[in-house]
């Protein structure tokens, strides 16, 4: 199989589906401290949520495009440990890797859930840790409105679910019906099972994975996952983590409800953070 034989992912984003968040189950399984034991100049790390958050953080198609341009067609290794995120951004990154002229090796080190699992499918060679997981599911969004609005949103989501299913099916050789059933059930696929089912080509050796990343970035990722387990909204988590990291959003009012420096952090979520930190230390 060549990358060119894989289905192209649909581009664009229906306006009704612009708001999204991560299912809490994916965050609960994510260990943000897992990374590659070693990396080189021809590697790209996807160690965060997919898509930009309120402050422009996260893994975006524009950042991946820039990284690929800098490699000038050389073979690339893409290390993945992500709980997923913005499906549309994930599909765009998948297309970038699918069309890249050099060989693309994807290494799933910890978790490649949701949008990150789509990205992983673009590898010429997909490798996965024995204790790592892929997670596939249908498009997942928050929605509100009357029954006509919700019916339209469901209709808008259907072709994207079909496109993801086609990608999984072609990459693995599984039937579209079997893949659709797995997506309906929000299925986690462990390392060996991923190889058996065709989602990966081989297992990674243990010495290729490290889970002792003690950088500030890894600590913040772990805290984000802990807070997600308590159902703290993502916007509130980002405010708390920004406060901990020592940087603040601008003082001016920001568009589209983005938090500004005058926004107050819910005191109850401070207690939640303290409890999460206490549990993390046990």
Image (tube, grey):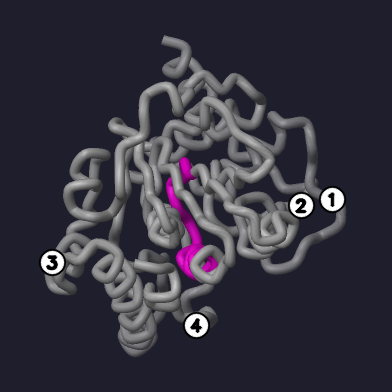
* Mark 2 neighbour class, 10 Å CA radius: few under 14, some 14 to 19, many 20 or more: some
Measured Cα–Cα span from mark 1 to mark 3: 48 Å
Circle 1 residue: 250
| Secondary-structure class at tag 1 | loop
Asked which secondary structure carries label 3, the reply is helix
Q: Please tell me which of labels 4 and 3 falls first in the chain.
A: 4
Question: Compared with residue 180, is residue 193 higher up or lower down, i.e. above or below?
Answer: above
> Residues at badges 4 and 1 in contact (C-beta under 8 Å)?
no
Label 3: how many residues lie within 10 Å, few (<14), some (14-19) or many (20+)?
few
Q: Quadrant of the C terminus?
A: top left
Residue that numbered label 2 is attached to: 260
Q: Distance of mark 1 from mark 2, alpha carbons? A: 6 Å
Range drawn in magenta: 80-94
Task: State the residue position of label 4.
Answer: 14
Q: Residue 178 carries which label?
A: 3
Secondary structure at numbered mark 2: loop
Near-viewer residue (176 or 135): 176
261 displayed left or right of 257:
right
Marks 2, 3: nearer the viewer: 3
Q: Do the residues labelled 1 and 2 touch (CB within 8 Å)?
A: yes
Q: How far apart are marks 2 and 3 (CA)?
A: 46 Å
Which sits earlier in the primary sequence, circle 1 or circle 2? 1
Residue at the spot x=40%, y=68% of the render? 2
Is residue 170 shown in magenta?
no
Sequence-earlier tag: 2 or 4? 4
Residue 225 image offset from top left, x and y in percent: 46, 36
For discs 4 and 3, the disc positioned in front in the rendered view = 3
Q: How far apart are marks 4 and 1 (CA)?
A: 30 Å
Q: Where is residue 187 in the image (x, y as percent from the top left)?
A: 22, 52
């Amino acid at each position: 199989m060549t990358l060119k034989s894989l289905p192209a992912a649909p581009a664009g984003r229906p306006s009704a589906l612009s708001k999204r968040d991560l299912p809490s189950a994916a965050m609960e399984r994510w260990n943000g401290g897992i990374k590659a034991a070693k990396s080189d100049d021809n590697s790209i790390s996807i160690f965060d949520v997919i898509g930009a958050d309120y402050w422009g953080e996260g893994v975006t198609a524009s950042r991946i495009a820039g990284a690929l341009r800098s490699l000038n067609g050389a073979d690339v290794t893409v290390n993945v440990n992500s709980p997923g995120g913005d499906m549309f951004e994930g599909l765009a990154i998948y297309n970038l890797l699918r069309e890249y002229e050099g060989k693309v090796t994807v290494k799933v080190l910890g978790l490649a859930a949701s949008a990150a699992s789509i990205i992983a499918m673009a590898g010429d060679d997909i490798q996965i840790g024995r204790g790592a997981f892929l997670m596939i599911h249908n498009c997942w969004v928050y929605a509100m409105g009357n029954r006509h609005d919700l019916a339209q949103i469901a209709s808008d989501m259907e072709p994207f679910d079909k496109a993801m299913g086609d990608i999984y099916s072609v990459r693995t050789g599984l039937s579209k019906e079997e893949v659709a059933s797995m997506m309906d059930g929000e299925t986690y696929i462990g390392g060996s099972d991923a190889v058996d089912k065709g989602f990966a080509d081989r297992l990674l050796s243990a010495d290729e994975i490290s889970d002792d990343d003690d950088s500030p970035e890894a600590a913040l990722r772990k805290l984000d996952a802990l807070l997600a387990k308590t159902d703290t909204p993502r916007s509130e988590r980002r405010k708390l983590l920004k406060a901990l990291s020592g940087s603040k959003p601008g003082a001016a009012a920001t568009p589209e409800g983005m938090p500004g420096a005058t926004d107050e952090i819910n005191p109850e979520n401070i207690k939640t953070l303290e409890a999460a930190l206490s549990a993390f230390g046990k």
